[in-house]
Every structure is written in C-alpha cells, then in structure tokens.
C-alpha cells in the first residue's frame, strides 16, 4: 500500500511525513514523529488521553487519520511549554497535585488549554463540562478542576 505524503504544521513547525491511508494521527504523532505526549487510552475517542487541537478544534487524535492533517495546524502537549517555561496550566497541575500516573494528563491539559482559549473565565460547571470528554482513573476530578481555575486566574492577570 502506497504512503500518503502530508505537509502540516505541528506546534508551530512545518512538518512533512508519509503515512498509510488508515494510520491515525495518534499513530503518526507517536510512531513516526516521536511526539509521545498524547496517549492511547481507549482507541475509540471515549477517554480523551489522545486529545490534540487541530485548527483550533479539540479532537481525539485516535479518531483522526494522519492524512487528514494535510495543510492543518496541529497543537500537541509538546507545544505547551516554551523551553523550560511551563504553561500556567502545567504549573498549576503540579501545584495542585492534579496528576498521578500521567496517562490522562496531556489530554486534560490540551482540553483545558482549548477551554481557556475560548472561555478565559469559566465557572466550575463550565470547566467540568469542558473537560467531560477526558477520563481520569487516579486523581478524581476536583484537583484538576481547581488547577484549571487557578491557571485561568493566573492567565487573566498575565
């Protein structure tokens, strides 16, 4: 089977790759490009562990074909920090102990980033709704919600 040539932008960098027509964006990110932050939790789009942002839209990368990234702008967890400077969400997740095993954390961070980009002052209910597509089996959700609330306050002041 012939590969599909794809030109895209990932975390602000122009990227080109070859993938199989049936290969998911998650597989491309992890196996071809070495961007292993997005995790496969379920493979069916139910857990959010593989969340990325494509053209400003939060998606489960296990449900998007790698070929569909052609000409698109993809944002992954690897693009959140700037060098050694963590994104406020990442810093607040650490401060609030909003992570344990780490499988779900990248997806939650990307979903929270997407939420705060669209709604910089979300209520607790809006945060819980915005993160509803992400599942955590370790921490529960209160610490995650508190971390997002705290990050929103920091980001509004920045």
Image (spheres, helix red, strand yellow):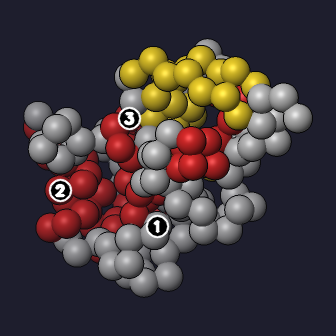
Which mark, by number, is residue 88?
none
Mark 3: secondary structure:
helix
Image point (84%, 29%), residue name:
2
Q: Is residue 25 left or right of residue 148?
A: right
Q: Is residue 94 left or right of residue 37?
A: left
On the image, the x and y values in percent for residue 120 come to: 32, 39
Mark 2 Cα shell of 10 Å, populated few (<14), some (14-19), many (≥20):
some
Image point (38%, 35%), residue name:
117
Give the labeled residue for mark 2. 91
Mark 2: secondary structure:
helix
> Is the residue 26 above or below the residue 135 in the image?
above
Name the quarter where the N terminus is drawn: top right
Image point (67%, 68%), residue name:
42
Tell me, yes or no, if residue 125 can be seen here: no
On the image, the x and y values in percent for residue 75 come to: 45, 35
Q: First in sequence: mark 3 or mark 2?
A: 2
Give the labeled residue for mark 1. 104
Tell me, yes or no, if residue 79 can be seen here: yes
CB-based contact (under 8 Å), mark 3 and mark 2: no
Mark 1: secondary structure:
loop
Q: Is residue 67 left or right of residue 55?
A: right
On the image, the x and y values in percent for residue 93 come to: 25, 63
Task: State the CA–CA distance, disc 2 to disc 1.
Answer: 16 Å
Give the labeled residue for mark 3. 117
């Amino acid at each position: 089977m012939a590969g599909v040539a794809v030109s895209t932008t990932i975390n602000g960098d122009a990227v080109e790759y070859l993938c199989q027509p049936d290969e998911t964006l998650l597989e491309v990110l992890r196996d071809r490009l070495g961007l292993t932050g997005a995790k496969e939790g379920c493979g069916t789009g139910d857990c959010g562990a593989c969340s990325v942002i494509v053209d400003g839209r939060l998606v489960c990368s296990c449900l998007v074909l790698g070929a569909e990234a052609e000409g698109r702008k993809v944002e992954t967890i690897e693009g959140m920090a700037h060098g050694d400077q963590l994104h406020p969400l990442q810093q607040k997740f650490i401060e609030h102990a909003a992570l344990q095993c780490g499988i779900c954390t990248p997806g939650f961070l990307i979903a929270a980033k997407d939420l705060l980009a669209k709604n910089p002052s979300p209520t607790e209910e809006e945060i819980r709704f915005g993160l509803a597509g992400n599942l955590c089996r370790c921490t529960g959700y209160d610490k995650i919600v508190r971390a997002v609330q705290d990050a929103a306050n920091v980001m509004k002041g920045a």
